[in-house]
Image (cartoon, rainbow, N blue to C red):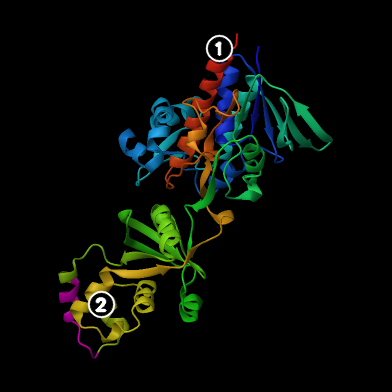
Amino acid sequence: MNKVGIIGGGPAGLMAAEILATAGHSVTVFEAMPTVGRKFLMAGKSGLNITHAESHSALLDRYGAARPMLENALNRFTGEDVRTWCAGLGVETFVGSSGRVFPKAMKASPLLRAWLARLQDLGVTIRSQCRWTGFDGNSLTFETRTGEERHQFDAVLLALGGASWPRLGSDAAWVAPLRMQGVEITPFLPANCGFEVAWSSFFIERFAGQPLKSVTATSAAGTIPGEFVVNRWGIEGSLVYAHAATLRDEIIAKGTAVLTVDLMPGRSTERLAADLARHPNKLSFANRIRKGAGLDPVKAAHLRECFPNASALDPIALAAAIKAVPITLERTRPIAEAISSAGGVAFSALDENFMLKALPGTFVAGEMIDWEAPTGGYLLTACLATGRAAAEGMIAFLNAQR
């Protein structure tokens, strides 16, 4: 029986533990936090979006430039496979109106409890409050409640997460020890993040915290429908996250970025202009755009925030403004606030089985690797898929050592 160490108790690490233990290996999971799955549980607080029900080809496209490197892992553990796996744990799932897949209970805790019970039955040992600190020859070193420990394994999986939400354990402290071993690391950047906007004090005081619903937003990523939230420092929400990678890269290249919002995507510019023209200028501007364009107060304020002279525009120009409100984004929010991160272990540092070329027998999975995806179940799906693929690579490696 081979002795395997898994460093990190998130979805990627736990999935690898399940596959390895099922194959008959002795598995110990080391987790720096007091309990495993903390970011997983946080993600499930507002409804655990576990995968997406769109076609597999469409799902693969969500990983952008990383698709070629992730495709084999995702082909072997598809979105439908995620749902089947959940069912095997006694957790029923359903497809929401947007195609996102959720457990019927919505929360992450029932799924995690069932998963941990399965791992216990498989003989997996979980060591909490054991922080991996690096290498000492052939040993891995850990900081524990009772002092430093050293352990040796026949194979190791690192599944330590990225650099977002460090208070939940993903603090990227693993970068330094891996770089010392010659592993190429791409610098981290925020992904699925909010952006800062120089709102006026009036707009902040009146509308911070309110959503803009039923709009579309356009950037180099395309035109996408949805909603987002205005807050004191800028904008955030699912529609913003869908554009986040493109906007972040534009800010890096140019210093600022522009997200263009259509406040009334259901009406053409011509139709809006005609509707606005039917309401005389003697009406207040607020009443004109409410009656003529159907803008609610936050949309109307948003229009005036970005077009201070909106009340002086003729119906045609006003309609064009409503259909293309530019929001200038000054910077991303800090990576510690981001839902996920880009960057991490470069794919060039890995072989086809997610093993580090510089450290034979040491594998990586999950958000440690340099890939990103929008929200919508794609992050969790790829973490599970890479954890599974890395475990299968470990099994092949161990079999080859016999």
**Sequence-first disc among 1 and 2:** 2
Q: List x then y, in percent, for residue 77.
A: 43, 27
Q: Quadrant of residue 55?
A: top left
Judged left or right of residue 279, residue 83 is: right
Please name whichever residue, 252 or 181, is drawn nearer the observer in this view of the structure.
181
Identify the residue at image location x=42%, y=53%: 245
Q: Is residue 240 above or below residue 154?
A: below
> What's the mark number on residue 400?
1
Q: Nearer the viewer, residue 201 or 371?
A: 371
Name the residue carrying label 2.
291
Residue found 48% across the figure and 60% down from its top: 194
Q: Position of residue 250 (x, y in %)?
A: 40, 59
Q: Is residue 28 left or right of residue 308?
A: right
Q: The residue under label 1 is which amino acid type?
A: Ala
Magenta-drawn stretch contains 276: yes
Outermost top residue: 402
Which image quarter is the C terminus in?
Answer: top right
Amino acid bearing label 2: Lys
